[in-house]
Image (cartoon, rainbow, N blue to C red):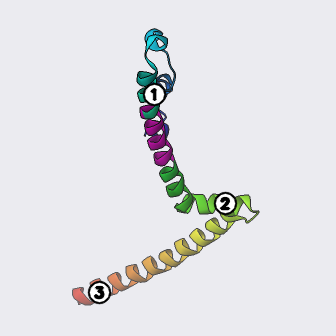
Amino acid sequence: AAMRERDVATLRDLFRQAEVTDAAFEARTIGEKLVWAIREVARLDGVIADLEGELTAVRASETHHLWYRQQSGEAVIELLERDLKAKIATEQDRLAELILTYRQLLERREM
């Protein structure tokens, strides 16, 4: 979530949690250090799983597919522009027809 939201403060905090910054860390017993390490590995595994999930979601998105096609040399923007212009023209024709029909109905009603 911190990566997605570009939350620098949280990212720094997560980085600090991954480091052994506690001055008393060296005084801990091997067992305490091992427990810390196991917990840290579990936390990092969770972070990795979250990031892999986000990466999978990004790769499945339409935006990624468009980006990939563009990177592959396909003129995606131009194709999208052409398709959009065609849709706009179709909808403008449809609107003109609806306006004409509406005016005809108004004329009939006034008679």
The label nearer to you, 2 versus 1, is: 1
Q: Which residues are magenta?
A: 39-51
Q: Residue 104 in the image: x percent, y percent?
A: 34, 87
Which quadrant, please, contains the C terminus? bottom left
- At mark 3, the secondary structure is helix
Q: Residue furthest right?
A: 73
Counting residues from the N terminus, which is met first, the one under dot 2 or under dot 1? 1
The residue positioned 66% from the left and 69% from the top of the image is 79
Badge 2 amino acid: Tyr
Q: Name above or below for residue 18 compared with residue 65.
A: above
Q: Position of residue 29 (x, y in %)?
A: 43, 17
Above or below 48: residue 111: below
Q: Secondary structure at mark 2?
A: helix
The residue type indicated by label 1 comes to Leu
Residue at left offset 23%, top offset 85%: 110
Specify the quadrant of the image occupied by residue 38.
Answer: top left
Q: CA distance from mark 2 to mark 1?
A: 44 Å
Task: Tell me the amino acid under the disc marked 3.
Answer: Leu
Find out whether residue 43 is within the magenta segment. yes
Q: Is residue 4 left or right of residue 73?
A: left
**Which circle marks residue 68 in the picture?**
2
User: Is residue 99 shown above or below 2?
Assistant: below
Q: Residue at x 42, y 24 (%)?
A: 31
Q: Dot 2: within a 10 Å radius of its alpha carbon, few (fewer than 14), some, or many (20 or more) residues?
A: some
Of residues 62 and 20, which is closer to you in this image? Answer: 20
Q: Which sits earlier in the primary sequence, circle 3 or circle 1? A: 1
**Lower sequence index among marks 2 and 3:** 2
Q: Which residue is mark 3?
A: 105
The residue indicated by pointer 1 is 34
Q: CA distance from mark 3 to mark 1?
A: 83 Å
Helix, strand or loop status at disc 1: helix
Examine the residues drawn in magenta and state their main secondary structure.
helix
